[in-house]
Image: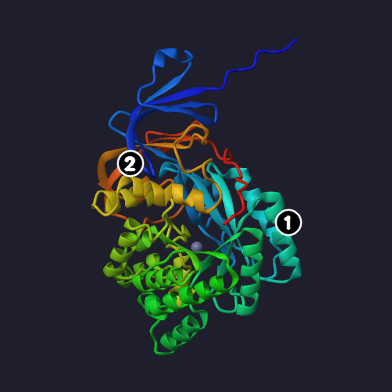
Amino acid sequence: MPGLMPRPRTCLIRGGAVVNADGERRADVLVEGETIVLVEAELDARALPPNTRVIDASGKLVFPGFIDPHVHVHLPFMGTNAADDHDSASRAALAGGTTTIIEMICPGPKDEPLASFEEWHTRAAASSRCDFAFHQAVVRWDDLAKSQLRELVDTQGQTSVKVFLAYKGALDLPDAQLLELLDFSAQEGVIVTAHCENADAVAYMQARLLAEGKTGPEWHEPSRPTCVEADGVQHFATCCQLTGAHGYVVHTSCRAALEQAARARKRGANIQVECVVPHLVLDDSCTHRPNFEGAKFVMSPPLRTFADQQALWEGLASREVATIGTDHAPFHFATQKVMGRERFTAIPNGIGSIQERIDLVHTYGVCAGRLTYAAMVDACSTQVARTFGLFPRKGTIAPGSDADIVVYDPARRGTFRHADNQGALDYCAYEGMERIGATETVLRRGEVVVEHGRTIAPPGGGRYLRRERRTS
Ligand SMILES: [Zn+2]
């Protein structure tokens, strides 16, 4: 005897302003099971099944779930690991409105791609509350790596890789190998994300500064000035142009680098630009804070000047900059950043921002008049989905898309406080800064995972996302 099929749960988000990358409009959103089924000006709630959950979004904004294109969670470093695991990082991400993360798989130089994919996938599948995908860092290039990367594309929909032009002798590929990898990626429809800095120049400047007794965190920026990054972008763009590869420059920090990317595009290179939220709202003066506190702000590329921040905001408004990520790479101040007390080159690089990204972009982008809501959604969700083969499943509020939805209160005011962070890190880089707006309710594929700004989903509900190849 056939059993009764349980009806999928339904949820109505009523009365909010729905914001997509092409604009905002007042609409109700109906969710059935994991999927958005209707977006209409006014849905009649009486026609819905009696157990429909109704979320009142009047006076609120309704965003598609935000996607962070650049995070580090499992990150082995100098015998330790970054402060978060997938449980804590995804708890913080959801609380900040991010429902999908794309994490960097960062293997050691001898590790095989299949084994490292397996390692990261197993960890994330066990405890991530966000849906997740990966950029596979390529730190070795040989026949084995090539065949395994092809297998990952074919069987796992693992369609993006990461290369380092920085980190001399540890993670960087020689140019001959980089070109082969780019060629391979162009053939396979794989997008190549790249950390662009001239590695030799960085190594030289670090040695010179240390020899001069310049050892504090404030010397991190002078060891990798803007011209070093611009040089890296120019170099990477040239290699992309030669091979026809689709390149994506991660964490672009300054005007000089943006100019190189724009020039490369004009001469035919297929290059996209990402910026990350620390570079938008913090500047290099932070690394001068006393009592070694400057180490909290050491990341690469380094924090720059206010003028560089302006250039990034302008690039976002004109869409020259495609996406905003975090480069979330949290290291505790008390036990990990201090490893670099004697010399800045030993300070673990990274700033935790996975929970704060959307509120920072809202406060310092939208409320400051630099971005529209539509541009914010585009940079923090839609464009990420489009670039990395997730659209329209992710990145938009439309019938047929996954019901990843953020109900956001744009009127809430306060300051950023470590006490509000739901991740594991022992400090907040944005402590005391003004904050406008707050994530209130979050749905991940139809399930309410955040209520009143607190993550309520248990660990492990996130799903691995197979992605499409690039066809253009
Ligand atoms: Zn990174």
Kind of residue sitting beneath label 2:
Ala
Image location of residue 190, percent across then percent down:
61, 59
Disc 1 is placed on an element classified as: helix
Determine whether 32 is above or below 237 in the image.
Answer: above
Determine whether 184 is above or below 227 in the image.
Answer: above
Q: For mark 1, what is the residue?
A: 151
Within 10 Å of disc 2 (Cα), the crowding (few <14, some 14-19, many 20+) is many
Q: For mark 2, what is the residue?
A: 438
Kind of residue sitting beneath label 1:
Glu
For marks 1 and 2, the one nearer the N-term is: 1
Residue 228 shown left or right of residue 119 in the figure: left
> Which residue is located at x 32 percent, y 45 percent?
373
Q: Quadrant of residue 304?
A: bottom left
Image location of residue 302, percent across then percent down:
39, 70
Image location of residue 444, percent across then percent down:
50, 36
Residue 196 shown left or right of residue 452 in the figure: right
Position of the C terminus by quadrant? bottom right
Q: How many marks?
A: 2
Disc 2 is placed on an element classified as: strand
> Which residue is located at x 62 percent, y 53 percent?
469
Residue 103 visible at all: yes
Mark 1 vs mark 2: give the one in front: 1
Q: Nearer the viewer, residue 272 or 292?
A: 272
Determine whether 138 is above or below 380 in the image.
Answer: below
Q: Quadrant of residue 103?
A: bottom right
Q: Nearer the viewer, residue 397 or 291?
A: 397
